Image: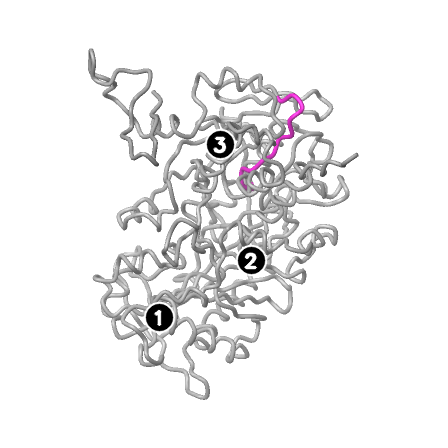
Amino acid sequence: MTIRYDRTLGASPRPVGASSGYPVPGQQNVTSEDSATAAFFASSCDWQSIVSQSFDVIVLGTGATAVAFVEQALKNDPNTRVLMLERGPFWLPEHFQNLPLPFINTMGAPPTTYPWARTKKMATEGPQFFQAGMIPVFGGRTSYWSAWCPTPTPELMRDWPEELIAVTQQPGFWDRARAFLHVQDMNTVKNGVYGGLQDQIDSRLSDNLGMIPNAQSAVPAPIAVGVPDWTTTSFHKFSVVGTLLSLGVQQQSLAAAGKGSALTIVDRCVVNRLLHDGEGQVIAIDTSRGVVNVGGAKIVLGLGAIPPATLLMTSFGERLPNAGGRYTGHFMSHVTARVRRDAYADLKPLEVAASYIAGEDPNSKLQFHIQLSAFAESDPVAQAVTAYHNLPDAAAAASMTQLLGSEDYVVFVCATLGECGPNPESWVRRAEISPDPASSVKLQLTLGPDEEALWDVLDEATWQALAAAATAPGGATPAIEYWVDGPGGVGGGWQSAQPGPADIRQTIIVHEASMVWMGADPATSVTGFDYRPHGVQNVYVTGGGLFPTSGSWNPTLTMCGLAQDLADRICPAPAPARCG
């Protein structure tokens, strides 16, 4: 059923081509997925023509890098014919923090999947790590991400080829990526929630950086919360859902005017394999809906880090012997502390702040960073909704249990991330362990001596950063109390002694990277500097899987910048017509 609505005339929606109550009742059963498909996605009937249509680009996935690529490609040339295939359904219209408070409950159990098996070594030895799961819905992880977006310097891109570093140093590379993600430095928000506390903590971290010997910099947190065009709010967590749907509407309008091509998006379409001619040229895509003819299209993998490696290994086998040979990412410590509110001047009843501190182990040169958030809430219950909508990181925020009784304090939450360096004992491998090709891999990530030493370094830096953020210029460091959970995570309380490693170290790996790392030599890398896996003709990769090393910095800004660069390379703006 098609609904037509003339907004300018204020007309009521009228159904076309279906019963509106005469002579019989109309449709009674409607699901949210049916509504989303009717409004935004290709229908089952459309699929019959899609499989044989000609496209310039077929993009797999609808996450951050997929949308960064598509937006730039269509900006370069609105006539680019793009097909996007998304595994999951429509889920949230926005980042969950922009939605009513009850949506915080979806954060605890989002539609997460784990399309892999961990090895016994990874699951039972050492820290017993598990890999953060995938969120296979429209927009991917961007409806739940923490949105921290630091800009790495060339010095932080340790062991990256010069050719790849040079890409990130092109004029406007970082500005364009920041604009796409709506990145804003938190000292510029000034919305009554961010302001005085933010400025004081930024100043103290800058003045007291020497209190953190292994830190190189401390800056106001760069987070993707910039104000979109349609809202007057001053803090709006970014999700690609709105961007992609807007692109669809834009391209539909341009196509109707003969000035562009429609953007075709198919949801609930699982890609099983890339079917090729034996020489590395993909000729078709095997999906849960049927086989799609590729023709002359270029295929862009916008699937995250592990799924592209899985798909490439499943599809090309020994043609890509190095795929999955590296597996890096970030491990984490999590500390909650508090100092008395009077350690800061003139605080309002509710204030929030967020700062980013970068450092490295002086011996191994492995990197870490501290995501420091601070909360001054004089009435946590009454301020809960406002605080929720302004959280710098909902996954690393003070709980109501910690805030109650802390009305006269500033509560700090530090998520400190360290990098897993390339390690021959860490890898992703093809494994016949599932009937689903998309999950037929096993993972193993372990820490070597350098990473174990780094974990000690970053924990010490966390204690030092808290002291630096709490200490006024020329003053003594105020008393700091630390939160320690009770047995099994139940209960807990504040204490003056710093908690031990078992109380703060997490078992999760985030920001996974490096499975299809870039390099010039096919013998020592997987993907070339043109974003094509070596020996594969018409497939291109985006995402953190391209990173030769992970560093410690949050990867999304860099990933999106590289995806935009890929769009410039394979979907450039047409050359201007010559006169005469």
Report the residue that reaches farthest toward the top.
23
Residue at which label 2 appears: 553
In three-dimensional space, the C-alpha distance between marks 2 and 1, rounded to whole angstroms, equals 26 Å
- The residue type indicated by label 3 comes to Ser
Q: What numbered label is drawn on residue 482?
A: 1
Which residue is located at x 43 percent, y 18 percent? 44
Q: What element carries label 2?
A: loop
Residue at which label 3 appears: 253
Q: Tell me the mark number nearer the camera, choosing from 2 and 3.
A: 3
Q: Is mark 3 on a helix, strand or loop?
A: helix
Residue 31 image-quadrant placement: top left
Magenta stretch holds residue 295? yes
Magenta stretch holds residue 213? no
Residue 399 image-quadrant placement: bottom left
Give how far across and how far down residue 467 sits, in percent.
Answer: 44, 77
Q: How crowded is mark 3: few (under 14 residues within 10 Å), some or many (20 or more)?
A: some
- The residue type indicated by label 2 comes to Trp
Residue 165 image-quadrant placement: bottom right
Q: Tell me the mark number nearer the camera, choosing from 2 and 1.
A: 2
